[in-house]
Amino acid sequence: MTESLTTFAPLETPESLHPTGNLLVALPEIDDRGWCRSINIAHEGQRGLVAAHSDSAVLRPVVTVDGVESAPVLEWSRLGHWVPTAHGSDGRGELDLTYLAPIGEQGVVARLLWTNTTGAPQDVSLAFTGEWSAVQVHHFKPKRLSVGLRERDDEWTGARTVYAGADRLLLSISWRAGEGATHAAPPAHGWSTERSATVEPGGSIALDVYIGVATEPDSSGGTALHLRRRGADALLADTLEWLDARALRTGDGALDARLAENLFFSYFFAQADCVDSGRAVMLTSRSPRYYVSGAFWSRDAYWWTFPAILLTDETRARRILVESITTAGADIAHHALYITGQRLYPGFELDELTAPLLAIWRYTDSTGDRSVLDEPGIVAFLAHYRRELAEWFDPRLGLYGTFLLPTDDPTDYPFVTTDNATVAVGFRILAAFDDSAAAAGRLLDQALAVEHALLDRAITPDGRWAWAIDASGAQEQREEPPLGLRVLDYFGVVDAPAQAATERWLVTDYEHHYAGRYPGAGAPHFASPSSFDLANRMLVRNADLGDPVAQFVAAPLDNGLGCESWDPETGEVATGAAMASVAGFLAWTAWANRTGHRRWNDPFGRDTDRSGS
């Protein structure tokens, strides 16, 4: 029996969650009841995410009316397409709950509001309570740490604090009661903040709690007080203003809502600022639901996520581009890295070498800012790119090899067609960056040579694109949607008959095409229709399976957010829940579809000419 060396995506059980966060603090697991199971930060010292996890809830709203607890079914929506808010009624009154991670702040604000809808006064008690069960570190799967949890009530800041650490402090969370509220007797390693009053008919009572997050108690307590000083209303208004200024608008309300939610999910969950050091990092996802959360993949970062960040905030895009490339260094093309740049899961991937170069091009072309090319980390990467690329060149074929495929699996056919298409693009980008006309001309010749080698060697006898070839020139026919055959034309490798034949094959004969209400292509790695294939179809405007943008809007996905793959009939997540990087891929390709960006060097950005839409 042949040994399998492929790692398959685990199947998911769909769960209704409402993640939120900012670049410093993430709340990835808020359930339909409003219970929040964890709070996490990016932590350079631990090379991943550090989370306060609860076996019940680190934050749980409680409403008691005339001595009886109220627990209405909550209907969830998002303010500004990002701030989760819920509303419910139990016949005695209406409950509103909001979780806010204010922009630029190292903390969270939670608000609970009760309105008396009866004709009689009510004795109402509102509370937020919670307990911290364990400290978890995430790089791929969560690991529990054996560290002590301690508590203190700080009279100076008025905060209740729980913090974790042994010889070195790791994470601290502080709770500051809002107006009219007090700290109540807390559970072990926990907290309870409450407010009580008699509420007249038609009247309301609100409870705010301000939560500071840091690596040690003095900072978390001071941050909680700072948030209280700013106030929930001002923090919410500033956040909604920031979100509104960055939401993309196509004129289609349903598309704009789906696009914005995925854009912001990717922006806040596929990158972060490390709370212990301030380093800006890129990562797969800040949610523990994603099966390889808290780690860095170059392809995920620069091909899927970075364009979405660039559409959201050009200033942030420059910073994260420079810092993440500098951090990854010479290991940037290895399968997966810790967020601090060391190898986590070794294995060279050609697409992970070329993806950063495409991101650098996209930034300079979109913004006109070529000063980024003078950054030491970028200079070092461009030199490393040429050296490492040359190591994988086969002069007999005129093509470049890889060890792992775009699904991170090994292959016996290392000369991948789409990988080499990105190499050709890379030579064109290097030519555009080179001030020497002679050197630029040589680079363009290299691009043409790769393109011609693909046209000569990578078209099958029956006229389709081959997925890859081996060292002898033998061809393999398959598909890997994370860098699929559909996008060859996008990268400028054009043979119209071969492209048309390939796209017909992907729908009619490809073994991992899945028909259904929400159809699409998967792969051995994920045997379901994939977001990658949907994004590819949006990017090249392929309508063989219907309007791909309409499918993006209609599919349930992972509560509306991007996931690796879904059930073809229900459209619900099948693998890769909470995959923040692919949410960015869906967002920017939907935008590209509607704004006329069809080729890698077409105009790209908020000011894109929409005449082609």
Image (tube, rainbow, N blue to C red):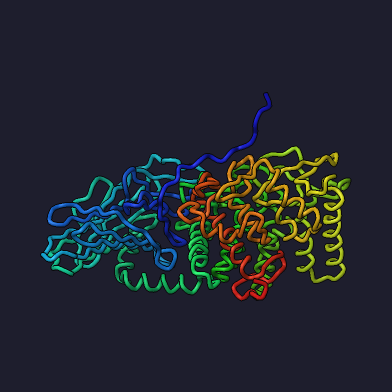
User: Looking at the picture, how far across and down is residue 205, in whole percent?
Assistant: 20, 66
Residue at point 48%, 53% (across, down): 556
Question: In the orientation shown, which residue stands out farthest toward the top?
Answer: 1
Q: Quadrant of residue 365?
A: bottom right
Viewer-side residue, 443 vs 291: 291
> Could you tell me how many numbered marks the image carries?
0
User: Looking at the picture, how far across and down is residue 537, in whole percent?
Assistant: 65, 57
Decide: is 460 above or below 255.
Answer: above
User: Looking at the picture, how far across and down is residue 238, in whole percent?
Assistant: 40, 73
Q: Is residue 536 left or right of residue 170?
A: right
Would residue 324 be visible to someone looking at this image?
no
Residue at point 40%, 50% (across, down): 16
Q: Is residue 202 left or right of residue 546?
A: left
Residue at point 85%, 66% (across, down): 439
Viewer-side residue, 65 vs 21: 65
For the N terminus, give its image quadrant. top right
Viewer-side residue, 171 vs 583: 583
Residue at point 35%, 64% (across, down): 223
For the C terminus, give its image quadrant. bottom right
Viewer-side residue, 459 vs 160: 459
Would residue 193 be visible to someone looking at this image?
yes
User: Looking at the picture, how far across and down is residue 523, in whole percent?
Assistant: 64, 43
Question: In the orientation shown, which residue stands out farthest toward the left?
Answer: 120
Q: Is residue 10 left or right of residue 104?
A: right
Q: Is residue 241 left or right of residue 328?
A: left
